[in-house]
């Protein structure tokens, strides 16, 4: 069978012979009457008519991940449990921007150009499915970017109907795969709760989503929100009192019999770790509810 295919399509090889980092360049087919072998044909060799004809005689494996070269290592890490990508070392801290919408893959060239221009650098873009992609943005200037502004640009310039979730600061020493999954969970729940809303930030939807989660999911979200600092009980207790004192530093320090510099150090530690401003109401409300729920104050 492979010999016959190669006469028409020189790139035809057995699936097992496809280099792992080039799998996205191939269509995978299985002979309907011979299930022992699966074949791979390079997409660039196939016209639309070729694909239609092949599907008459062969079963095609429908893949949702149409990845661009260089993206496969991140897809394999986040979705297939492979080792962390080598390029992770380039990003000591970063943020994920999650995008979902129709025709993202069809417009990948224009979309890539628009995203690179908006973020003003060659950001890492990973297609997770044909209708969703992930943007990895170095954190040194990620605060400059606003999901509402980005959604407006993509809607106006590319006529794309998109939804965007901007995640918190991520550190390369974290379990990044788990962080991605937690943000994806928050994104999907937020979209279900607020179908008319187009953009979401890391903490703003937490108070609405948390009661809908199972106990183990609430625990995972608690870990996500505090970026691993939830085990530092003094910090959590201090933060909770800070909320009770209406974000008043002087009153909090007086109530805890604590030097104001110590209080500020703990607050700064959390803000540096998560990259959020806890003095903004949505962030403060989310963390307050998380602490009350998880610590049973």
Image: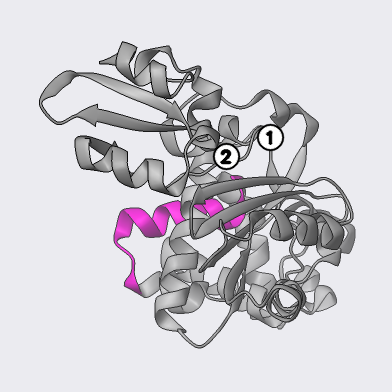
Give 203 or 5, whichever is nearer the viewer: 5
Judged by its main secondary structure, the magenta piece is helix
Q: Which residues are magenta?
A: 212-228
Q: What is the number of callouts on the image?
A: 2
User: What residue sits right under mark 1 in the picture?
Assistant: 172
* Residue 126 locus on image (x, y percent): 61, 45
Q: Nearer the viewer, residue 121 or 16?
A: 16
| Residue 232 visible in this rendered orientation of the protein | no
Residue at horizontal 33 percent and vertical 66 percent from the top = 213
The residue depicted at 69 percent of the width and 82 percent of the height is 281
- SS at circle 1: loop
Label 1 Cα neighbours within 10 Å, binned few <14 / some 14-19 / many ≥20 = some
* Quarter of the view holding residue 31: top left
**Residue 218 locus on image (x, y percent):** 39, 60
Residue drawn at (65%, 75%), measured in percent from left and top?
Answer: 284
> Residue at image x 70%, y 60%?
111
Q: Examine the image and state in which quarter residue 188 appears.
A: bottom left
Question: As rendered, which of 41 and 186 lies closer to the eye?
Answer: 41
Indicate whether 33 appears above or below 97: above
Pick the residue in front: 36 or 263: 36
Q: Are marks 1 and 2 in contact (CB under 8 Å)?
A: yes
């Amino acid at each position: 069978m492979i010999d016959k295919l190669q006469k028409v399509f020189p790139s035809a090889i057995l699936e097992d012979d496809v280099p792992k980092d080039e799998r996205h360049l191939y269509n995978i087919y299985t002979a309907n009457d011979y299930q022992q072998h699966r074949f791979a044909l390079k997409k660039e060799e196939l016209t639309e008519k070729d694909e239609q004809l092949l599907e008459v005689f062969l079963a095609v494996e429908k893949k949702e991940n149409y990845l661009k070269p260089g993206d496969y290592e991140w897809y394999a890490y986040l979705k297939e449990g492979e080792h962390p990508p080598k390029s992770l070392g380039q990003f000591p801290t970063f943020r994920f921007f999650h995008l979902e919408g129709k025709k993202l893959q069809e417009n990948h060239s224009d979309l890539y150009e628009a995203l690179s221009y908006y973020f003003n650098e060659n950001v890492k873009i990973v297609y997770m499915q044909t209708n969703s992609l992930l943007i990895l943005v170095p954190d040194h200037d990620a605060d400059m970017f606003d999901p509402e502004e980005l959604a407006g640009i993509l809607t106006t310039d590319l006529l794309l109907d998109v939804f965007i979730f901007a995640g918190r600061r991520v550190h390369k020493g974290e379990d990044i795969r788990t962080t991605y999954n937690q943000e994806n969970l928050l994104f999907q729940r937020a979209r279900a709760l607020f179908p008319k809303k187009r953009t979401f930030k890391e903490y703003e939807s937490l108070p609405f989503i948390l009661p809908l989660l199972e106990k183990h999911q609430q625990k995972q979200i608690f870990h996500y929100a505090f970026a691993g600092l939830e085990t530092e009980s003094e910090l959590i207790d201090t933060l909770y009192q800070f909320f009770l004192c209406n974000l008043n530093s002087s009153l909090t320090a007086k109530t805890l019999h604590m030097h104001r510099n110590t209080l500020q150090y703990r607050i700064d530690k959390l803000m540096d770790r998560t990259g959020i401003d806890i003095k903004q109401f949505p962030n403060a409300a989310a963390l307050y509810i998380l602490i009350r729920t998880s610590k049973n104050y």
